[in-house]
Image: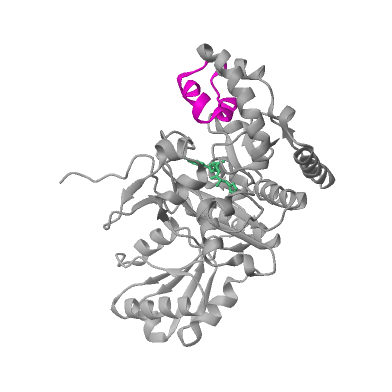
Amino acid sequence: MSVIKGVKGVKDLLPEETPRWRFIEESARRWATRYGFHEIRIPIFEVTTLFARSIGASTDIVEKEMYTFPDRDGTSLTLRPEGTAGTVRAYIEHNRAAIPVPQKYFYTGPMFRHERPQAGRLRQFHQFGVESYGIADPRADVEVIALLWHILHELGLPSLTLEINNLGQAADRDIYRPVLVGYLKHHEAGLCGNCKHRIEANPLRVLDCKVPECRIITEQAPRLSESLSETARSYFAQVLAGLDLIHIPYSLNHRLVRGLDYYNLTTFEVTATNLGAQNAVGAGGRYDGLVETLGGASTPAVGFAVGLERIAMLLPDSQNSLIPADKTVYVAGFGNKGSVAGLTALEELRTFGIPAVSDFRATTLKAHLRQADRLGCQFTLLLGDDEAIKGAAVLRNMESKSQHDVLLSSLPSQVQSLLRPS
Ligand code: HAM
């Protein structure tokens, strides 16, 4: 029979890797909770229009990266390429605006984009994201950026840069767009094929192109900052002042326009120098128009998402070793009576809350001890027929080799006291 393999760009996380992931997710959750965000769990798939309308019909994501399929009744469905659109839909659908306290959510889970897979770029990847609704105040932007910064810093990720830009309001961009298009048309011949197409479809994205020839041309392009209203400038200045106040370092990047159309005013991205081409660890911004675009009342909003694969790639091993290993007892039940008593011992220890394992294939003490070593267990309960008849087993510390008798009648509490560091 031929072997069935996993889908390209879709990875398994094997048991050796999951502690690293749990460590990252738990750290992010802890920080988000500290900042007053509460978990929301949104569906993996939604109707296609939700993403087309929110992310933007002429973005790369909607144009060529979505996993879209017809439901049995013909409705077009899409696997979520990101979490913001679904969170906004849930916010509107459950009338969360009626709740008189700030609505601040976090989420984590898989996202799907049909991109060309490479290191740090997958077709099924995972994000941790936060979204804050209802607050049109620069302090909300600062709060969200500070949360992003702290999550990444506590994890000890090296060489991070926070880049930030002001995209202004839709009206500002309406003034800027024809100015930029005029300039780009004049230099069209020198642009890459993608950017030629973007001049009409999504001209601001040309500023973000990484092709060196395009960068030279756009370096001289008129800047969006020149078309910004006084309100947009003042808002952004307050965001920067807030970041200064709480000592979050940033660098201004006028090219940061983002690949999703819903942003206005503040946009930001955290990059890492040692991630290669896919260097964005996390990104986000303000998106005050999206709730209304999706049929809700006008609602200011701001949020970000980080890519968990990219964080896992950057996480130093020293951080990973901070994960406390549970003390696991290996139960070596051998012989007819010892095997039966071993099964009872395993059950009692686990019910009491002590992690306990065994390898039922082992039939001799020697084989059991070898498996206990391989499994990295610090303690082994030796339980042969003699011990089972006597009602007392031996708990061996695998490192110090010291041994203690333990009565089977009160096994879990005795083992527990011996596991405690002296
Ligand atoms: P995004 O920039 O598209 O923003 O994605 C956020 C992060 O997800 C990226 O910085 C990257 O770390 C990770 N990521 C994206 N695509 C992939 C991929 N193919 N493979 C691995 N990692 C990837 C958003 O998704 C917005 N929803 C963020 C946001 C939330 N804005 C406001 N609220």
Q: Is residue 135 magenta?
A: no
Q: Is residue 159 above or below residue 189?
A: below
The image shows residue 28 at horizontal and vertical percentages of 62, 55
**Foreground pick, 22 / 287:** 287
The image shows residue 149 at horizontal and vertical percentages of 69, 46
What residue sits 54% from the left and 64% below the top? 326
Q: Is residue 419 left or right of residue 248?
A: left
The image shows residue 46 at horizontal and vertical percentages of 42, 55
Regarding residue 215, the answer to whether it shows in the image is: no
Residues in magenta, as a range: 191-212
What residue sits 43% from the left and 56% below the top? 44
Q: Is residue 242 left or right of residue 208?
A: right
Which quarter of the figure has residue 416?
A: bottom right
What residue sits 57% from the left and 34% below the top? 279
Q: Is residue 195 magenta?
A: yes
Which image quarter holds the C terminus? bottom right
